[in-house]
Image (tube, rainbow, N blue to C red):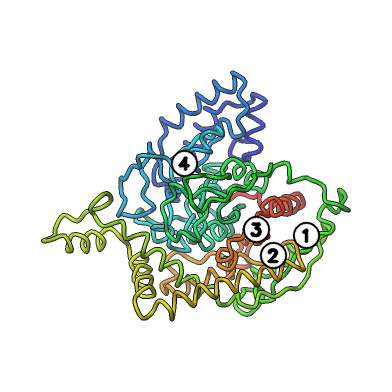
């Protein structure tokens, strides 16, 4: 098996048995990144630093180090700040910006031995569902170059799918890990809000943003998430909760289960609202087939209701822009970031710097957020959206009384064509199935479940799994068992 065909687990085993060195792995992936630069997956690559880190990892392994990710290559979404590489969040506003510190996620993965190859492209300030909003150009889907990869973590998803790296970090505010993972045919997990530190993650919507892992399999995601997670006193939203051994949980036996039925006793809820009008037939068919595989593994499928799911789009697109309006006010051209060259006074400097530095979608969301927070509209919009958010969370709590996991589609359609979505509202509606879990702060993941039909036969479909708070191990266990009887996660685009 070639290095490109090996997933993170396979590469880790090859490093441990000495059949490959970290330097060889890194050189191989750097060559693939250069060969497939046309995908637009990366905005910055530091080959020299990566090779130096790889040699250090090889020396550490020779000295007996057993760090969990020692010598394994990965990439970071450009929403995580780094001292040694630019941190742009996909925006002209931060073009060339270098942070004086590293994000906690970056530090923890480096301490676990991972070798960072570079930073991946993304929708500007994580605002988008297609990765067409980046100031550095759109990302292309490796399965079909005419399709979007999803967003906002589209660069990370495309890089993993194209075998440019075996794993990458992502961030998920309203589905920005799960949707691109689904569109690119990889596995992605958004943990419970607060499990991974947000320190050093450039903020979009602070009460929703959460770091997560993107890789080819549930096993790979479990390994990366285990290194990323944990309490961080520098993040006021970080949760003091023990981090389990996620990889050990993948094959942990369930009570009453056996080798043939490893998911026996697991109740999986199917929200009727997620299989309603608007869901494309090709996506539903792939998801239903994956659900039948879960049933074959012993899981029980039960009907449930999430009656306020249809309100999630309206609530999210009030709350997230409101928080963005506040968070992005720091970009004023004074302390850091882009500053306009032409202005007459301070007010004009603010206006010109923001007009030049922010893209259309970011401006749109700032305007929406400022409007709903303004006097006379706060109670009518923002406060009502917060109440709906609480009701959506209560719906999940009620549903989990009759099931252990919730399953359904990640997105109502497969990836659409580049440039096809010109109506912002249409792209917002594409988040219909991912937004509820984000609003409730629940862990959720996307698992490859097949492909579309006909002209979409090369466009992947993802199965979404949602668990109660801190149920990451349960999610990963179910996904891993599904991947033992399916091969969708092993399939690679013909590049």
Q: Name the residue: 41% across, 68% down.
A: 321
Q: Is residue 255 above or below residue 361?
A: above
Give how far across and how far down residue 88 sits, in percent.
36, 49
Marking on residue 333: none
Residue 185, x across and y down, in percent:
60, 55
Distance between the alpha carbons at the discs numbered 3 and 1: 22 Å
Q: Which residue is mark 1?
A: 294
The residue tagged 3 is: 469
Label 2 – label 1 distance at C-alpha: 10 Å
Residue pushed farthest left?
A: 344
Mark 3 crowd level (few <14, some 14–19, many ≥20, 10 Å Cα): some
Q: Quadrant of residue 409?
A: bottom right
Give yes or no for contact between labels 2 and 1 (Cβ–Cβ under 8 Å).
yes
Measured in 3D between alpha carbons, the distance from the residue under mark 4 to the one under mark 3, in whole angstroms, is 37 Å
Evaluate if marks 1 and 4 touch, with contact meaning CB atoms under 8 Å apart: no
Foreground label between 4 and 2: 2
For residue 407, the mark is 2
Does the CB distance between marks 4 and 2 fall below 8 Å?
no
Residue drawn at (56%, 43%), measured in percent from left and top?
228
- Nearest to N terminus: mark 2 or mark 3: 2
């Amino acid at each position: 098996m070639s290095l490109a065909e090996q997933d993170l687990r396979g590469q880790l085993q090859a490093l441990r048995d000495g059949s490959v060195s970290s330097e060889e792995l890194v050189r191989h992936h750097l060559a693939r990144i250069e060969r497939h630069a046309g995908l637009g997956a990366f905005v910055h690559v530091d080959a020299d630093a990566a090779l130096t880190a790889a040699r250090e990892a090889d020396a550490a392994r020779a000295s007996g180090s057993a760090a969990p990710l020692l010598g394994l290559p990965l990439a970071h979404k450009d929403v995580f700040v780094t001292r040694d590489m630019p941190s742009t969040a996909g925006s002209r506003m931060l073009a060339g910006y270098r942070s004086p510190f590293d994000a906690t996620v970056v530090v923890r993965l480096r301490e676990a031995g991972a070798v960072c190859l570079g930073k991946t492209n993304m929708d500007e300030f994580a605002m988008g569902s297609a990765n067409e909003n980046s100031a550095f150009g759109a990302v292309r889907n490796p399965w079909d170059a005419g399709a979007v990869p999803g967003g906002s973590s589209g660069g990370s998803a495309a890089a993993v799918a194209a075998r440019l790296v075996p794993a990458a970090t992502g961030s998920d505010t309203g589905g920005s890990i799960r949707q691109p993972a689904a569109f690119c045919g990889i596995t992605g997990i958004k943990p419970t809000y607060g499990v991974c530190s947000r320190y050093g993650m450039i903020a979009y919507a602070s009460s929703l943003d959460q770091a997560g892992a993107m890789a080819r399999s549930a096993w790979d995601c479990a390994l990366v998430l285990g290194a990323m997670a944990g309490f961080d006193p520098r993040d006021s939203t970080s949760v003091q909760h023990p981090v389990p051994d996620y990889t050990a949980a993948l094959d942990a036996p369930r009570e009453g289960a056996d080798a043939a039925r490893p998911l026996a006793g697991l109740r999986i809820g199917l929200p009727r609202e997620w299989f309603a009008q608007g869901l494309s037939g090709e996506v539903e068919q792939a998801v239903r087939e994956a659900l039948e595989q879960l049933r074959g593994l012993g899981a029980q499928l039960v009907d449930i209701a999430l009656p306020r799911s249809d309100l999630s789009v309206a609530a999210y697109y009030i709350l997230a822009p409101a928080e963005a309006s506040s968070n992005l006010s720091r970009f004023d051209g004074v302390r850091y970031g882009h500053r306009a060259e032409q202005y007459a006074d301070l007010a004009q400097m603010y206006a010109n710097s923001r007009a030049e530095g922010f893209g259309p979608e970011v401006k749109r969301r700032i305007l929406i957020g400022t409007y709903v927070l303004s006097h006379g509209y706060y109670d009518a919009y923002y406060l009502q959206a917060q109440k709906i958010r609480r009701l959506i969370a209560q719906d999940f709590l009620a549903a989990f009384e009759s099931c252990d996991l919730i399953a359904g589609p990640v997105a109502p359609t497969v990836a659409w064509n580049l440039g096809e979505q010109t109506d912002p509202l249409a792209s917002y509606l594409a988040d219909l199935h991912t937004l509820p879990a984000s609003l409730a702060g629940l862990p959720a993941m996307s698992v490859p479940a097949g492909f579309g039909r006909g002209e979409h036969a090369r466009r992947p479909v993802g199965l979404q799994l949602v668990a109660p708070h801190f149920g990451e191990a349960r999610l990963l266990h179910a996904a891993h068992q599904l991947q033992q009887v399916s091969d969708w996660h092993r399939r690679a685009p013909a590049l």
